[in-house]
Image (cartoon, rainbow, N blue to C red):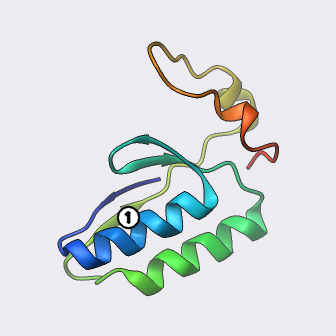
Amino acid sequence: MAYDIADVKRLHQVAKVCEDWGLRVQYSVFECRLEADSFARFWTELSAVIHRKLDRIVAYKICTKCAREIHRAGVQEHYEKIVACVY
């Protein structure tokens, strides 16, 4: 999940929704491993916060096999320690 939000108040609201569902990996990028029904609720919450003509949210679906092959380096918590469900 990545976002570009034009207004500071909406930016904080979007970040809060994302923090409730996933792990921040960059300032405006989150990893959210969700089942399909959870993703639908997550997306609905985000869509209610943004301004559709000024803001942008993007979710990239990654299959379970591909998610296991993500390469990471440097300082960051391992996502597997935080969330058990996989989208």
At a point 72% along the width and 55% down the height, the residue shown is 34
User: Can you say whether 31 is above or below 80 in the image?
Assistant: below
- Residue that appears at 47% across and 67% down: 16
Q: Which residue is mark 1?
A: 57
**Could you say where residue 57 lies in the image, as x and y percent from the top left?**
37, 64
Between 14 and 4, the one nearer to me in the picture: 14
Using the rendered view, name the quadrant where residue 68 is placed: top right
Mark 1, residues whose alpha carbon is within 10 Å: few (<14), some, or many (≥20)?
some
Residue at the extreme top of the image, as rendered? 73
Element under disc 1: strand
Q: Position of residue 45 (x, y in %)?
A: 54, 79
Tell me what residue is drawn at x 26 percent, y 78 percent. Answer: 9
Q: Residue 39 in the image: x percent, y percent? A: 67, 65
Residue displayed at 48% across by 75% down: 46
Q: Is 66 rendered above or below residue 43?
A: above
Decide: is 2 above or below 47: above
The foreground one among 40 and 8 is 8
